[in-house]
Image (tube, rainbow, N blue to C red):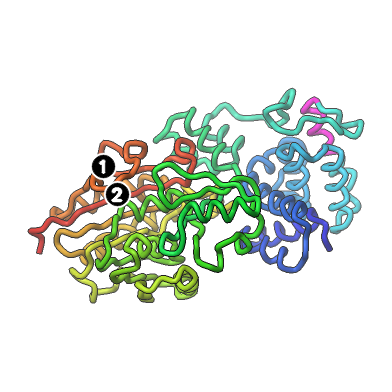
């Protein structure tokens, strides 16, 4: 079977049973051999329908007699696919979106409801001012170009943004408190785009010029990223990552620009002892090794052995020797006390800065899970800070934009740790002004810097601490 819409339906059915969106999509892709454009359509339909779930459910609520949660689950999934194409897929003619969705209903046990599916989607088109009744070939399908938007939005600004951009209200609230209305809207729009792919060049094996030339020779466009000496961003579609020149040779690894900033902030030096306390899957660990010219010792600790295997594969591919792997929970290690020149605590977090990469993350996290994570983060920083020698450095980083996991964790730690202070990084060239705050920590806002959302802070242990 190679019908991308039917395959999307199968993957989404898995997601609604609890599977992660990327896992469900991979499972389907492994069983079929699709042309590139069908593969792209399938990926777009799965991730898009998951991301836009709240908006799509609201459309069903407003247009059908039965609310979305009262519809049979498989039918709801089919309607999501139809509405997603009509609302967000400009290149798909409205008639094709309607007809293929009716066909899906017919083939998946709802042949008695094809009239209902057809009627519902055409009602959307009519309200949008499109020619829904006459095939709807030229219906504008992006919300911005609709004559009138069929989606009715409430007055309350949290709910309005939540429904329009498809986020839970609590996440909108967290952003509004930090950014205000206009920037929250920009951030929501940014988070709903397809993610870009950044590479980090391995300077021990190659140069950025050599990688640029190799990629250009196979027609892959890239651009450099200011202030990040190892970063290249792929422009447009590059196909499978493993097939890009230099993968097997260990010339580069995939790592977002924001994550590359973290290791530069740590600024590890050749010959030092560095502990990466939550290392898997190892993007930052391997970067630390590259920055140290692979000289010195890096302890890569993590409690998930399966994810540490990924780190091992990556360090072998990049041909790095200085990384030692240590399985276990960093909160319970006592053998590292006062041994490290530098510690990186890239703490487990809610991932609110990387939701564009993980289509279902916005529906999996809750205020409760954030509270639990902030407790874990405080325990981790309290314990891993004991690994640092007097005079040494600890960098705390997360890929979330929630103050409870960032500013509040650091403020609480500093309040009970008089021998620690925030250090503004002056000795190396980071575009610090773009990200730094008056308090001395760094916050990368995706809609401002066009990279994943991140929080990072560099702390120094005073020499007189015992």
Q: In the figure, 298 relative to 92: above or below?
A: below
Viewport quadrant of the C terminus: bottom left
Q: Are marks 1 and 2 in contact (CB under 8 Å)?
A: yes
* Viewer-proximal residue among 169 and 335: 335
Q: What range is drawn magenta here?
A: 119-129
State the residue position of label 1. 440
Name the side, left or right, on which 80 lies relative to 462: right
Most frequent secondary structure within the magenta stretch = helix
Would residue 448 be visible to someone looking at this image? yes
Q: Is residue 26 magenta?
A: no
State the residue position of label 2. 457
At x 74% / y 36%, what residue is drawn? 90
**Mark pair 1, 2: CA separation:** 7 Å
Q: Mark 2, residues whose alpha carbon is within 10 Å: few (<14), some, or many (≥20)?
A: many
Q: Residue furthest left?
A: 464
Residue 204 quadrant: bottom left
At x 73% / y 37%, what residue is drawn? 87
Q: Mark 1, residues whose alpha carbon is within 10 Å: few (<14), some, or many (≥20)?
A: some
At x 88% / y 51%, what residue is drawn? 103
């Amino acid at each position: 079977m190679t019908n991308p819409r039917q395959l999307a339906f199968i993957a989404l059915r898995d997601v609604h049973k609890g599977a992660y969106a990327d896992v469900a999509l991979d499972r389907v892709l492994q069983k079929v051999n699709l042309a590139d454009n069908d593969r792209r359509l399938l990926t777009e339909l799965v991730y898009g329908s998951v991301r836009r779930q709240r908006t799509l459910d609201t459309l069903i609520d407003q247009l059908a007699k039965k609310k979305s949660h009262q519809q049979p689950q498989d039918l709801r999934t089919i309607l999501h696919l139809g509405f997603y194409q009509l609302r967000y897929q400009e290149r798909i003619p409205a008639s094709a979106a309607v007809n293929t969705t009716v066909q899906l209903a017919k083939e998946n046990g709802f042949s008695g409801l094809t009239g209902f599916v057809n009627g519902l989607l055409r009602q959307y088109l009519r309200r949008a001012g499109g020619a829904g009744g006459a095939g709807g070939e030229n219906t504008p399908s992006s919300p911005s170009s609709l004559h009138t938007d069929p989606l009715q939005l409430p007055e309350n600004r949290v709910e309005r943004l939540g429904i329009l951009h498809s986020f839970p209200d609590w996440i909108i609230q967290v952003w509004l408190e930090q950014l205000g209305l206009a920037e929250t809207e920009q951030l929501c729009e940014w988070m709903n785009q397809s993610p870009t792919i950044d590479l980090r060049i391995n300077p021990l094996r190659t140069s950025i010029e050599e990688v640029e030339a190799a990629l250009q020779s196979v027609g892959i466009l890239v651009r450099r990223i200011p202030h990040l000496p190892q970063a290249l961003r792929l422009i447009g579609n590059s196909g499978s990552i493993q097939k890009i020149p230099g993968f097997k040779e260990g010339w580069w690894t995939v790592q977002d620009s924001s994550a590359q900033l973290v290791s530069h902030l740590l600024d590890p030096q050749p010959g030092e002892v560095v502990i990466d306390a939550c290392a898997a899957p190892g993007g930052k660990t391997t970067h630390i090794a590259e920055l140290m010219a692979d000289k010195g010792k890096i302890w890569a600790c993590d409690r998930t052995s399966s994810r540490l295997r990924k780190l091992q594969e990556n360090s072998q591919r990049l041909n790095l020797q200085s990384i030692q792997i240590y399985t276990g929970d960093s909160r319970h290690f006592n053998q590292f006390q006062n041994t490290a020149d530098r510690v990186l605590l890239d703490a487990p977090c809610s991932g609110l800065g990387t939701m564009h990469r993980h289509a279902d993350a916005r529906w999996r996290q809750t205020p409760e899970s954030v509270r639990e994570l902030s407790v874990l983060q405080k325990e981790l920083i309290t314990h891993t800070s004991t690994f640092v020698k007097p005079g040494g450095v600890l960098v705390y980083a997360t890929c979330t934009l929630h103050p409870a996991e960032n500013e509040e964790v650091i403020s609480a730690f500093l309040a009970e740790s008089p021998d620690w202070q925030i250090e503004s990084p002056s000795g190396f060239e980071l575009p610090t002004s773009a990200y730094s705050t008056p308090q001395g920590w760094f916050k990368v806002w995706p809609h401002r810097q066009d990279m994943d959302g991140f929080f990072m802070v560099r702390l120094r242990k005073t020499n007189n601490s015992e």
